[in-house]
């Protein structure tokens, strides 16, 4: 399960291709997550003493910690085309080996440059998005309001 993390440049090139393939398919999602990397670092920082007055005492480490940034296409399961497979994914749900998983570790000294480039990649990826068609939902809401208004009058 342990995977090697990509370099920041490799992460961005593969993230761009992941976004492009999702746009070419016309559907799908790209999930981006980030969190603080607290273990497995090369510099083990001494644990900070717990402060009784501060409930968020662990948010102030003595040394800045690196970040791990992940991207995936979210395709963890796929429905099997077997008999007995239902549409809810009960019986015919199988693990998808084609799920795209990308991750990189960002060191504290390069966070600013990383997030500048990260924002550019995300903005470019959002240009191809289409607005949701909410006209059906609006029609339903108008119908409900008319029904309530007519039912309230004697």
Image (tube, rainbow, N blue to C red):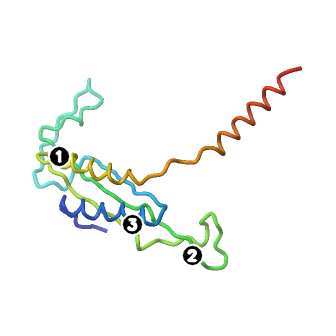
Give the percent coordinates (x, y) of residue 39: 21, 52
Disc 1: CA contacts within 10 A as few (<14), some (14-19) or many (>=20): few
Point out the residue furthest to the bottom here. 82
Q: Nearer the viewer, residue 5 or 10?
A: 10
Cβ atoms under marks 3 and 1 closer than 8 Å: no
Mark 3 sits on what residue? 21
Spatial CA distance of label 2 from label 1 is 42 Å
Q: Does dot 2 land on a helix, a strand or a loop? A: loop
Cβ atoms under marks 2 and 1 closer than 8 Å: no
Q: Is residue 110 left or right of residue 139?
A: left
Mark 2 sits on what residue? 80
Spatial CA distance of label 3 from label 1 is 27 Å
Rendered image quadrant of residue 141? top right
Q: Does dot 3 land on a helix, a strand or a loop? A: helix
Label placed on residue 111? 1
Q: Is residue 145 above or below residue 128?
A: above
Disc with the residue nearer the chain's start (3 vs 1): 3
Q: Nearer the viewer, mark 2 or mark 1?
A: 1
Quarter of the picture holding the N terminus: bottom left
Give the percent coordinates (x, y) of residue 36: 25, 46
Q: Is residue 55 above or below residue 73?
A: above
Q: Nearer the viewer, residue 123 or 35?
A: 123
Disc with the residue nearer the chain's start (2 vs 3): 3
Residue at 71%, 35% in the rendered image: 142
Q: Nearer the viewer, residue 137 or 41?
A: 137
Residue at 42%, 63% in the rendered image: 22
Quarter of the picture holding the C terminus: top right
């Amino acid at each position: 399960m342990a995977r090697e993390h990509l370099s920041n440049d490799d992460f961005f090139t593969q993230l761009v291709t992941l976004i492009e393939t999702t746009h070419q398919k016309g559907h799908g999602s790209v999930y981006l997550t980030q969190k603080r990397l607290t273990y497995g670092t090369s510099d083990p920082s001494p644990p900070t003493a717990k402060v009784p007055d501060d409930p968020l005492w662990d948010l102030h480490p003595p040394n800045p910690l690196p970040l791990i940034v992940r991207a995936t296409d979210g395709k963890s399961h796929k429905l099997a085309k077997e008999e007995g497979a239902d549409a809810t994914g009960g019986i015919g749900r199988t693990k998808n080996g084609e799920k795209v998983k990308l991750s990189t570790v960002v060191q504290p000294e390069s966070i600013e440059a990383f997030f500048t480039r990260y924002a550019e990649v995300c903005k470019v990826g959002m240009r191809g998005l289409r607005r949701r068609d909410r006209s059906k939902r609006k029609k339903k809401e108008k119908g409900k309001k008319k029904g309530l208004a007519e039912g309230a009058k004697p």
